[in-house]
Image (cartoon, rainbow, N blue to C red):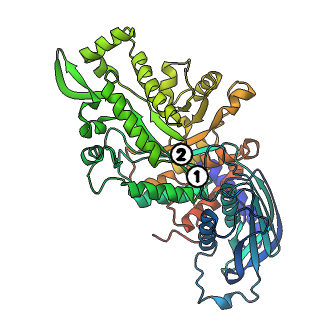
Amino acid sequence: MARTAHSSRLRCCLLLAVFVSQFVERVCGVWPLPQEIQQSGDSSGLSPQLFSFTYSQDSAAQTGCSVLDTAFKRYFSIIFPDFTKEGLHDMWLEPKAFVVSVSVKTRGCDGYPDEDSDESYNLSVSDGQAVLRSVTVWGALRGLESFSQLVYRDDYGAYFINKTEIVDFPRFAFRGLLLDTSRHYLPLHAILKTLDAMAYSKLNVFHWHIVDDPSFPYQSRTFPDLSKKGAFHPFTHIYTQSDVMRVIEHARMRGIRVVPEFDSPGHTQSWGKGQPDLLTPCYKGSMPSGTFGPVDPTVDTTYRFMERLLKEVKFVFPDSYVHLGGDEVSFACWQSNPNVGKFMEKMGFGRDFTKLESFYMESIMNITAALNKTSIVWQDVFDYHERPRSQYVVEVWKQGCYLCEMRRVTKAGLKVILAAPFYLDLPIPTQNWARYYGVRPLAFRGTKEQKKLVIGGEVAMWGEYVDATNLHPRLWPRACAAAERLWSNEEKTLNADLAFPRLEEFRCKLVRRGIQAEPLFVGHCKQEFNGL
Ligand SMILES: *[C@@H]1O[C@H](CO)[C@@H](O)[C@H](O)[C@H]1NC(C)=O
């Protein structure tokens, strides 16, 4: 890989020397690659004091549209990072007006993005103006991001944009990123910054793996003891209701959905601290050993508790999806417990504990269905019960033949999300980004209908070895490789060597915007990381 990277670098330098004037920064384009993009050498200058975003007259959204009003401000400072109204006037000898006019077909400024949101947009940049058209405000956000990436500076700091035509839409509707806030607590700023970088990469689902065995940082209104006793610290290492609302609003402003995960029946050790009779007591011989296993699926109190918790989750998190986990349940404790044994007998499960888990997961999925939510579960749930009795979304996470699993799940008529090849938590070298880039989510044998059930993929950043000190460099720019795989046309983005210079440039853009994205190879950014 190092060699490949090196040769692309050389190729890019040659291109630079031959075609591009040494004073103008090379413009390789937009990341992730738009479905169609045509650029020309006609460039126009931009001067911040005469630059503006406006709503075009025919737009359904007008001033007062929260999502776009704030996006205009945000992108102005992203495009002109060091502009202050007072200084710098003399730098632009002939300031010229430039207007970006935005036209959105449907208003919907106060809603939330969802599974069916249309994120398509058309962007046309010409001399002195740009026209951005989209169906929804979420599509307009994607177009503003592309616009911001087209602007470049020369060595004197002047701003330019070239004549460009873009027609763009995502390949997959679900382009997720998982953060794990149980194994290490991530302060709010780390989550918000991740959402910023997701928007730059056009990722659109924040999968919040908010609780797990090690800690329960979610401060529940209904069950305050869960975080009081189950968080690493009851005051400093929790997410209050207002923290959660801030995350959801920050995400909404960037067209990002927030899908919370309350993983059970396994991965619940921390829940047991604040909710005494929830977990199964494990036995040693005929006596309880004092340790606890997964959630106890044999008692009514469990389902009443889960129902109240999920009701709260429905109220707090507006997204129509909720992730119910269901992975890696250890059966040893259930096996040891005589009450569980009796229950198994009564239900006719024999000694097959996968049936017990299926029984539990089905009950929980029925609760979410009654709350009008779509359940996502890890693939274990499907594997135990390949003939699904209800509709749910399967997330494929196991290494090995993940495409075989995609094939089985879609054959059963269920929607599927691919995470297995996008685990980023283990520190493989950054230069191996192409490993994620090379993933082909639809490369399994199956009908057109089956392929349509693949709704997307997800980057997973588990927290065993990750906290706020190393989160961003471990995510970026490797997550960008997955982001392009999930957004762009695969046929046009199969060659990692061709993508490399564009990714390098995008990584520098992330760095300039304050994201600690790791370097991909020897080189420099025009503006190095500023330490903030
Ligand atoms: C943008 O325009 C400049 C100046 O004409 C040119 O050197 C550069 O190659 C153009 N970039 C693209 C991507 O067309």
**Residue topped by disc 2:** 319
Query: Label for residue 141?
Result: none
**Neighbourhood count class around disc 2 (C-alpha, 10 Å): few under 14, some 14–19, many 20 upward:** many
Instruction: Tell which of 526 and 530 is nearer to you.
Output: 530
The reply to whether residue 468 is in sight is no
Q: Residue at x 50, y 51 (%)?
A: 475
Residue 208 against residue 286 in the figure, above or below = below
Query: Which three-letter amino acid code belongs to the residue tagged 2?
Result: Asp
Q: Which structural element holds mark 2?
A: loop
Q: Give me the C-alpha separation between circle 2 and circle 1.
A: 8 Å
Residues at discs 2 and 1 in contact (Cβ within 8 Å): yes
Query: Which three-letter amino acid code belongs to the residue tagged 1?
Result: Tyr
**Residue topped by disc 1:** 112
Q: Position of residue 136 (x, y in %)?
A: 70, 55
Instruction: Tell which of 159 and 58 is nearer to you.
Output: 58
**Furthest-left residue in this view:** 287
Q: Position of residue 442 (x, y in %)?
A: 68, 33
